Amino acid sequence: MKRFAPFADDVLPWLTCAGMLAALAMIFLYVPSEQQQGTSQRIFYFHLPIALSTYLAFFTVAGASASYLLQGDRFSDLLTQAAAEVGMVFCTLVIITGSLWARPIWGVWWTWDPRLTMVVILWTIYAAYLMLRMFAGDTEQTARYAAVLGIVGVLDIPILHVATRLWRGIHPKVEKMAPEMMWTLLVCLGAFLFFFCWLLWLRLRSLSQQDEVAALRREMLASL
Amino acid sequence: MWALLWKDVLLELRTKERLSSLFVLALLIILVFVFALGPEQARRPEIGAGVLWVTLLFAGMLSLQRGFLIEQERGCLFGLLLTPIDAGTLFIAKFLGNVLFLTIVEAIVTPITLLLLGSSWSPLLLLLAAVELLGIIGFSALGTLFAAIAVRTRAREVLLPVMLLPLLVPLLMASVKVTSALLAGEAWPEAWLRVLLAFDVIFVVTGWLIFGQVMRE
Amino acid sequence: MTGWIIEAENLRKTFAWTPVLQDVSCQIGAGEIVSIFGPNGAGKTTFLRLLATLLQPSGGTLRLFGHSPTDAATRRRLGFLGHDSFLYPDLTAEENLTFYGQAYQLKNAQARIDAILTEVGLQQWRKTPVRIFSRGMEQRLSLARVLLHDPELLLFDEPYTGLDTRGVATLQTVLATTKERGKTVILTTHDFALGLEISNKAFILHRGRIIWESTGHVPPAEEFGELYHSRTQSPGSPTPDPRP
């Protein structure tokens, strides 16, 4: 954890800001409007990176869960917690940005397309995860239960994917993209990746500091 | 392992509380649906299938919780962990117990449901039973795993559905689709069947492997 | 592989990320009867549960009978009696024991069950559901459960609490018998007299650490009482008692 600190604390915030500014510039000044959808399509450049980040968060939760089950270390536990919280935030954003995009294009705020369905279910899995942590207290046992949930969740994803596809489908397919669009998208992906890592780091650091405070308090009480 | 299963059956025979409450709850849920949706709507095969499975889900949750609550009294779960029985075997025993109880309830509730909904059913009863069994297996696999978790935390009644339902969505979709196809007399939806089978296999194996982690303290 | 029944080295257990046991090291050989004393919250129950393999250590090493505590074979050789009886209230005494007999894969289970029920004086209650038992009777049946598979290592967590006079007498007899048969017993208790009477070794556990270990013979009860109070007399907040 300590070894990430210098990079995370000093470099990451700047990378994130720079990335975001570049992304905004490209979205509003550089990239041309899409043929069919017009200006509102630009939200796609936020929507897709956020969606990918949500999945990234989920896989982080699963990976850290496996790590915890194998090693039982506090860092893995804190990582799953931080990733789940950040993931939840991003998941909510996906739904909101998706909804804002859908209204002008499809005329509805919501529809049961496979990808949307998938994201909603993902949201509920995140919610279940956070609720488990909330209700079961902060113990090694809870960490283990949460890890099990994380792993089972990730195993469920492929099945969910197939099932929601079978169910029905109208999500816009990304066909050929003009090179400007490609570049914009890549910059946005990068910006959001930095943003995700930075948020994750901030939360992780905050959780770790809470631990340190608790330990200090215990030491103080014991030495009285 | 059979000793474990037999012990659970014996306990149930003694108290009869699990089966009776399951049965009554299932029946009530179905009635609630009929009253909420109206009998004409309920007659349609997709609705009938949906009602059947929702009932199973909620009655099933109750069954799952009971299954582990009996081990909470007097710390019996620790008694089990003390014995040479390993966690995987414990999982399979509890899993089979859950499958058994749900199957018994479904065997009685399904014909009644079909009767109340006015669907035709005689030629398909056996196939329907098979599909229900598959669904029950998938449900019990994940259910046993998460009931073991939920029962040892606060707010267990709310935590079990919250954890279980999102993960069960593919199972629910598949089971309802296959059941409604059966009831409507349509062709066998192969893709959904594969989803159902995959779900069952993956989660029975996962549960068996990971249960030890849940039991560890 | 040494001949020690229990070998613990720097055993550590955390609960809610707070250490409840730390730096606990000890070696117990076959046939020893060990008493563990300590104030509430000292970690006695936690330690015993670790030995019973009901808990896994957060750090350090533990070996039972020279093997890892996670082996199924190890579990067959030990028995644990705690505050909870581990009995199913809706089953009869006989059904409970039959179940545990099957779980431990006992041969001649029926004969063994008969014998053990007689030993704890519950023969006439064999067909009665445990729900009807008094606390004393339930503890006696729990003792029967522990002895059923004839374990080499017996772990008793405050066994004297909850026992009626008949139960205490039964327990003392059982402990004497196990001593004769060379079994190893670890027990935690608050009762200095009863504990020291049968033990050949004693520990004091305080705030998760072993603060005193007997060398040679155990001291008589009064002397021990003074020692105990002087060692455990310290102001400050007690560590929380984590009952898993």
Image: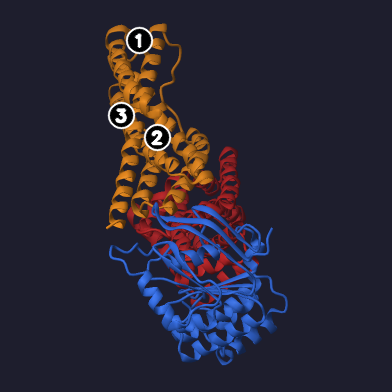
Chain colours: A orange, B red, C blue
Element carrying mark 1: loop
Any part of residue A151 in sight: yes
Q: Which residue is mark 2?
A: A119
Q: Nearer the viewer, mark 1 or mark 3?
A: 3
**Residue at coordinates 40% horizontally, 15% vertically from top-left?**
A186
**Residue at coordinates 62% horizontally, 56% vertically from top-left?**
B126
Element carrying mark 2: helix
Q: Which residue is mark 1?
A: A35
Circle 3: residue type: Ser
Looking at the image, residue C220 lies above or below residue B139? below
**Position of residue A68 measured from the top left corner of the image (x, y, whole percent):** 49, 44
The answer to whether residue A190 is left or right of residue A221 is right
Looking at the image, residue A171 lies above or below residue C125? above
Residue C39, image quadrant:
bottom left
Element carrying mark 3: helix
Disc 1 + disc 3, Cβ < 8 Å:
no
Q: Quadrant of the N terminus of chain C?
A: bottom right
**Residue at coordinates 28% horizontally, 22% vertically from top-left?**
A104
